[in-house]
Amino acid sequence: MGNVISSQQANRPAQEKDFLSDKVEHFTESVIREMTRQATLYGAVNLAQGFPDFAAPEEIKQAARSAIEKDVNQYAITWGAKSLRNAIARQMGVWQGISVDAEKEVTVCCGSTEAMISTLLALCNGGDEVVIFEPFYENYGPDSVLSGARPRFVRLHPPMEENGEWTFDEQELRRAFDRHTKAIILNTPNNPTGKVFTRAELSLIRDLCLEFDVLAITDEIYEHILYDGRKHISMASLDGMRERTVTINGMSKTYSVTGWRVGWAVAPEKITNAIRKVHDFLTVGAPAPLQEAGAAALSLPKAYYAQLAEGYRTRRDRLIPALQAAGFRCFRPRGAYYLMTDISSLGFANDVEFVNYLVKDVGVAAVPGSSFYRRAQDGARQVRFAFCKKPETLDAAAQKLAKLRHG
Ligand code: GLN
């Protein structure tokens, strides 16, 4: 799998004592974050890692400055500042009709990344299995290794034509569930495919969770980034799922503050207590003044979210033709801010060779598709571009990409 190494590769001669844990021998550093370093090294336009290169909303920057001025500079309550937990609980009611107890069901973490690993560490024992749709956001691989869980992958198939949807096979999904299954990890809107799971698909997953007595851990960080009339549906809002769902979200993508590291997990009380214990000893707490700014962010008017999505729609529609003109096949995303492409017609041996050429010789950084698959060959024809960038950044990338066709 992208950044997870097989045990064969991990076997080292006994005499080479290196003091490292077996766990870290089973995955590599993130390829996504490595591509950002490569972009800096070669001075390339960075369409690899998913972070905006434009300003965060003034209101929330002001809220952060003001919290620091007011000396909110010491540890917040371990599981999150009350103001932010209240705002999270309130907004889950407003957006998804889910009622949440801010005192008992919310844990604020250092980004949704920490929320996910804390959740898995709190829930998984060695031998437990977690079902993951593939291609998947690369963190879920190492997250599984670190928590001792064994991933079972279910394939998302790309659409036949640009406007189609990524789909999965119902029977394949069913076969991934058995008595060892602890949870399914679901990311909707999805990174890297841009798929927004429909109510029918979520209901199918719900039925399996109930039948096999399994939890859903849902990464909903792109909740507000939706296109073409698609709607986000939280798994916890489906009948029977509130009691068996951990909903993960955060400030990073919705408010363009990926470096602030403020995310959260919402779960029933008993599960929350376990997540809070892990979170406490991993990080103690997320940055206190930025949590106050989070409470302000979650109070922005409805229009903010509509503008956010529309801004990303125009960026998507700017990048797609540029990629198509350069010879990529594009799969139009319905949510999130990534474009998965097929590079078959570009004449390269595989995705890694291609992105290396792209960053060094063309001047654009992207993420090789293999990072999102367990077996590298399954992603060898795919490359992901992030379009959470200023129009001029996308235009600069487009100009460079034109070189692919015209030499
Ligand atoms: N979600 C972002 C991406 O997929 C990166 C997040 C991160 O690097 N923590 O590019």
Image (cartoon, helix red, strand yellow):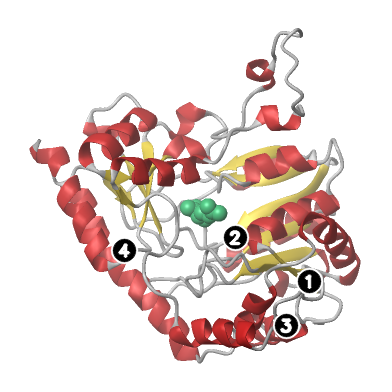
Q: Which residue is mark 3?
A: 89
Element carrying mark 1? helix
Looking at the image, the residue that sits furthest to the left is 406
Instruction: Please say if the residues under marks 4 and 1 sit with CB atoms less than 8 Å apart.
Output: no
Q: Which picture quadrant has residue 279? A: bottom right
Q: Which residue is mark 4?
A: 316
Question: N-terminal of the two: label 2 or label 1?
Answer: 2
Residue at 20% x, 60% y is 395
Element carrying mark 3? helix
Point out residue 85 in the picture as x, y percentages from the top left corner: 74, 80
Label 2, ligand 1: CB separation under 8 Å = no
Amino acid type of disc 3?
Answer: Ala
Distance Cα–Cα, label 3 vs label 4: 31 Å
Q: Residues within 10 Å of mark 1 (few under 14, many from 20)?
A: many
Point out residue 34 in the picture as x, y percentages from the top left corner: 47, 41
Residue at 44% x, 85% y is 58
Instruction: Please say if the residues under marks 2 and 3 sit with CB atoms less than 8 Å apart.
Output: no
Element carrying mark 2? helix
Residue at 52% x, 66% y is 222
Label 3, ligand 1: CB separation under 8 Å = no
Distance Cα–Cα, label 4 vs label 2: 25 Å
Element carrying mark 4? helix
Amino acid type of disc 1?
Answer: Arg
Q: Which picture quadrant has residue 155? A: top right
Q: Residues within 10 Å of mark 4 (few under 14, many from 20)?
A: many
Amino acid type of disc 2?
Answer: Glu
5 sits left or right of 305 in the view: right
Judged by depth in the image, the label closer to the viewer, 2 or 3, is 3
Question: N-terminal of the two: label 4 or label 1?
Answer: 1
